Amino acid sequence: MHACPAAIARGRTGRRPGWFPALLVLALALALAFLTLPVLAIFVHSSPGALLRSLGDPAARDALRLSLETTAIAVAIILLVGTPAAYLLATRAFRGRALVVTLLELPLVLPPAVAGIGLLAALGPDGLLGGALHGAGITLVLQTAGVIVALVFVSAPFHLRAAQAAFAAVEPSWGEASRTLGAGEARTFARVAVPAALPGLSAGLALAWGRALGEFGATLMFAGSFRGITQTAPLAIYADFASDFDAALALSAVLVAVAAALLLSTKLLARDALART
Amino acid sequence: MLSLALETRVGAVGLALSLEVADGACLALAGPSGAGKTSVLRAVAGLLRPARGRVACGGETWLDTAAGIDLAPERRGCGFVFQDYALFGHLSAWRNVAYGLPRAVSRARRRGEALALLERFGLAARAEERPGRLSGGERQRVALARALAMRPRVLLFDEPLAALDATSAAAAGRELAGVLRELRVPALLVTHDFAQAALLGDEVAVLDGGRIVQRGSAAELAAAPASAFVADLTGAVVLRGHARRDAEGLTRVALEGGGEVLALAPAAGDVAVSVHPWEIALEPPGSAASGSARNRLDVEIVSVTELGNRVRVGLAAPQPLAAELTSASAARLGLVPGARAVASWKAAATRVMPR
């Protein structure tokens, strides 16, 4: 943490600095500058006063509230269904497993517009399951529930991937030891696999939550952008930026802060949980 | 009483064996790595389902592939001490030990029982530590305490001392032997080390190629190995040759690569002969035959290794063999690699067995 890049490049032995370590440091410096510059710019541009004023704007408040509610529900669904699914993938070998993993990861590489079209084709009024949903009295399109569906679709693969890797990294003998000690499969999952995989699970949760908070394209196409119903914070920023750049900037700053806080708190929570057990 | 019969393929090994272990007895299953030893333990615990087989314990059938019975591991009650101990890294030592205690018991009582067991193994002060902060020997004792805490109906040990350094292994071995003596349930232990099998097992069964090739006390196996493989496992020198009966009624074995060995037991054809390293004496080259040792081989000294108060001398004659001497004898003879010597032992110390 305290070593400056030059010290890293020099190495610990004090030998003549090689060109390769210098190249590595340069690459890291470039990546860091490029990836943090836009975020920094948001805070440089928006004064604290403008930030507070934007929070007073009911449209911005609606958008933030909606974003927090929909992402929280989406992440809860992802956790409840995705975690056991990832456990199955990580601990069992079965025919077609590689194919299943690939299919689950497909939304990661899908363009958001394609995801939106796909959701419409599957769950829209004229979609594959549209009739069945209508019969059950469920409407998703242009509704808050539709936002949640879009968020789950685009964010779930992030948690699935991280959770699967985390479960796969747990010593298989721990699970076997748990079984011989009298714990059934469910208890082994709850008492050994989940606690042991907790750091990886929380990383997956943070990634999925961050992705859901930033979701734009699929939500816009599937659920639309109606204030208070489907207009999440990213959609509100988009709606604002042509007319009121300062408001868009301020809302962006709030979104960055919320996302960073979520990322940090999930990491801290996981560390605490691990230290307590 | 634990009884099992199983037949299954594990990787390249075809396992086919049956064995019984009485209550309070410990059977050590010895054999080289990859012989399928661990798979036997896993089949008993229910972690591996053999293609065909039967496992029964105390009148209860745990597995009967013919009858479609296969009890889940959590319903068998096997105390399994894994080779890497498999302690839960996210739980403290006492919580690891308490893990297998019945859930109906209150938390305070479970903690009390776990602490009592840890105390018995001298680990009371380490109860709150996570496994990552325990030494290898401490982890081994926590794993043992955890397996005993659940009041197992069978105890299974997979290479219990393999992950320890020599000093801790010796101490842990003595402690484990003490635990096994007090135990009222059958115990099955696998090891690749015959010395450990002899220390910990009331009986030793030697596993080779997925089959039990010999079973008996360690002393019986060392005195009368059924095959060259068993002799080699017991640490004996094994030489290969061709046997014939001579006019004296002795068996003469012409060794491959040169040299001849005398034995008392009748044998003919291609055989293996074995002799324990501590039965081999070394003399300076060219010394005249004296005493009762009828076997005399000219050997070259290949290596000299100190083993505490004795010395193991690696020899080539030209087949490899080894002698163990006291440090004093080794010093008197001035043994160095490259020097020549005469290795001698009695015909009665030579065991003959089929290859």
Image: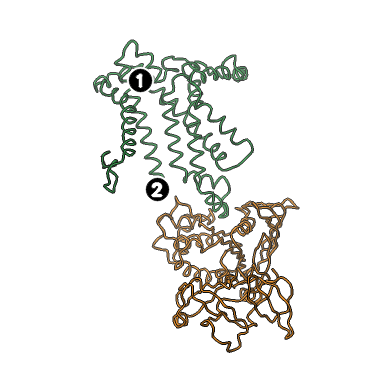
Q: Chain of mark 2?
A: A
| B180 sits left or right of A8 in the view | right
Q: Which residue is mark 1?
A: A61
Q: Amino acid at mark 2?
A: Arg
Residue at 35 percent across and 20 percent down: it is A61
Q: Quadrant of residue A16?
A: top left
Q: Which chain is orange?
A: B
Q: Amino acid at mark 1?
A: Arg
Q: Residues within 10 Å of mark 1 (few under 14, many from 20)?
A: some
Residue closest to the far front: B286
Say above or below: B250 vs B216: below
Say above or below: B77 vs A260: below
Q: Residues within 10 Å of mark 2 (few under 14, many from 20)?
A: few
Name the secondary structure under disc 2. Answer: helix
Per the rendering, the colour in which chain A appears is green
| A119 sits left or right of B92 in the view | right
Residue at 53 percent across and 57 percent down: it is B101
